[in-house]
Amino acid sequence: MGKGVPAIVLAAGASSRLGQPKALVKWNGESLVARATRILTESGCSPIFVVTRSELQVDVMLECDGAIVVVNPSPEEGRTGSLQIGLISLVSELGRTPRRVLVSPVDRCGWNLQTVEVLMGCNENTSPKPSGHPLMLCEIDKILSLPKDASLRESITISKIDAPGEHMNIDTPADLEGLQ
């Protein structure tokens, strides 16, 4: 399984369209951030970092037992900037740049343990079909060199692989109905 593969959950977005923090949205009695970290833990990923915004830090920490929560001081600069904060924290924790990192935005929640298991066999930037997340990323140095507002999918090549899961993106109140 995922032993030794670190993971990063991105949970620093403003959630302006949703009107509430996506990381704390409940699905089957569990917050989205708790669900993500639980599945990653069950898959053997270690360490697990959650990148959030300062005003959510305490709430996210309370939801993510065993994960390392770091704050992006400028989340409005873009999702790639949050990923870079997570990667820099991970490199600092490990004392080296990892070969592979599993990454998932907290609002892309249609994946499960089986999705992660399929990705663990990948040694290149890979996205599962049909869920689209999490991503297995292998070009860590290249990602660290991108502008904070760069589009990841436009900056690196990401292979697609069939894996269990469904495409879900929680952005609006209407999207929450899909979680019921």
Image: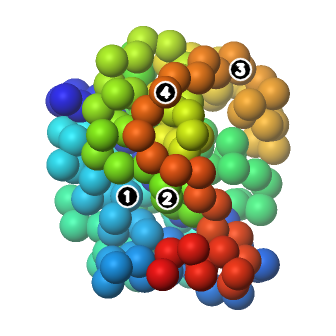
Give the mark toward the camera: 2 or 4: 4
Q: Mark 2 points at which residue?
A: 109
Q: Can residue 148 be seen in this view?
A: yes
- Outermost residue, top direction? 123
Against 157, residue 111 (above or below) is below
Q: In the figure, residue 61 lies in which quadrant?
A: bottom left
Q: Which of marks 3 and 2 is nearer the N terminus?
A: 2
Label 2 or label 1, whichever comes before in sequence order? 1
- Give me the C-alpha separation between circle 4 and circle 1: 20 Å
Do labels 3 and 4 touch, CB within 8 Å? Answer: no
For disc 3, the marked residue is 156
Query: Disc 3 and disc 4: Cα gap in Å?
Result: 19 Å
Using residue 155 as the reference point, say whether residue 71 is left or right of it: left
Tell me which amino acid carries mark 1: Ala
Give the Cα distance between marks 3 and 1.
24 Å
Asked if disc 2 and disc 1 are in contact, CB closer than 8 Å, the reply is yes
Determine the CA span between mark 3 and mark 2.
Answer: 22 Å
Say whether disc 3 or disc 1 marks the residue closer to the N-terminus. Answer: 1
